[in-house]
Image (tube, rainbow, N blue to C red):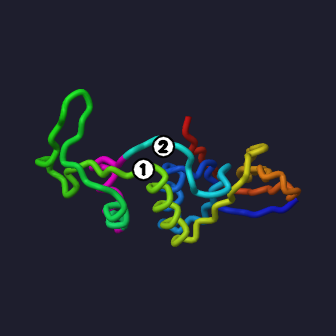
């Protein structure tokens, strides 16, 4: 069985897991992500855009321009009625139309720049906790004969969608 150690292991490489990993890496934490998908590509859509507060957070990290270049801004959003947010007190008083797949690709690229390790094509087989930390056992989903992989960390976080 192969083994690796990290300070924190995040289960799930969607937008939440990627953002959490990047934030931890910025704080100097050795973080890794375990992700089921073999590649960052997503089949089908979930989220279709980013709201002002999300854009403000990305701006604080200096990466908002990547997202703005990939999407299209809309000063009006529609829920049950059109809502003009162009006069909201923020630098990003608009909705950014951007597919979740593109959002994930941009976040994954940022995480890669921060040396976040992403273990792809892995399923979590087991999690064991004790006073020393957490052991996460994963298996390759592609069934390519690779041995199980054991990862150890003082903590872990689960970031998975529905």
Q: Is residue 55 magenta?
A: yes
Q: CA distance from mark 2 to mark 1?
A: 7 Å
Between 135 and 96, which is closer to the camera in this rendering? 96
Q: Quadrant of the N terminus?
A: bottom right
Residue 39's disc is none
Residue 45's disc is 2
Q: Is residue 8 left or right of residue 110?
A: right
Instruction: Look at the numbered disc 2 and give the secondary structure of its residue.
Output: loop
Extent of the magenta region: 49-62
Within-10-Å neighbours for mark 1: few <14, some 14–19, many 20+: some
Between 127 and 17, which is closer to the camera in this rendering? 17
Residue at 32% of width from left, 66% of height from top? Answer: 65
Q: Is residue 63 above or below residue 149?
A: below
Instruction: Look at the numbered disc 1 and give the secondary structure of its residue.
Output: loop
Q: Quadrant of the C terminus?
A: top right
Q: Is residue 133 magenta?
A: no
Between 24 and 90, which is closer to the camera in this rendering? 90
Residue 99's disc is 1
Q: Position of residue 16 (x, y in %)?
A: 49, 49
Which of the marked residues, 2 or 1, is nearer the chain's N terminus? 2
């Amino acid at each position: 069985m192969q083994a690796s150690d990290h300070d924190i292991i995040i289960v799930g490489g969607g937008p939440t897991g990627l953002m959490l990993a990047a934030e931890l890496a910025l704080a100097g934490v050795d973080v890794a992500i375990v992700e089921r998908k073999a590649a960052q590509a997503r089949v089908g859509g979930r989220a279709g855009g980013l709201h002002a507060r999300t854009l403000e957070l990305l701006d604080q990290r200096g990466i908002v321009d990547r997202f703005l270049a990939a999407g299209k801004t809309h000063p009006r959003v529609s829920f049950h009625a059109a809502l003009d947010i162009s006069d909201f007190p923020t630098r990003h008083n608009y909705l950014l139309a951007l597919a979740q797949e593109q959002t994930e690709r941009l976040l994954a690229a940022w995480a890669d720049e921060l040396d976040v390790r992403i273990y792809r094509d892995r399923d979590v087989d087991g999690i064991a906790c004790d006073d020393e930390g957490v052991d996460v056992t994963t298996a390759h989903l592609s069934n390519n004969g690779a041995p199980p992989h054991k990862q150890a960390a003082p903590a872990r976080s689960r970031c998975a969608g529905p």
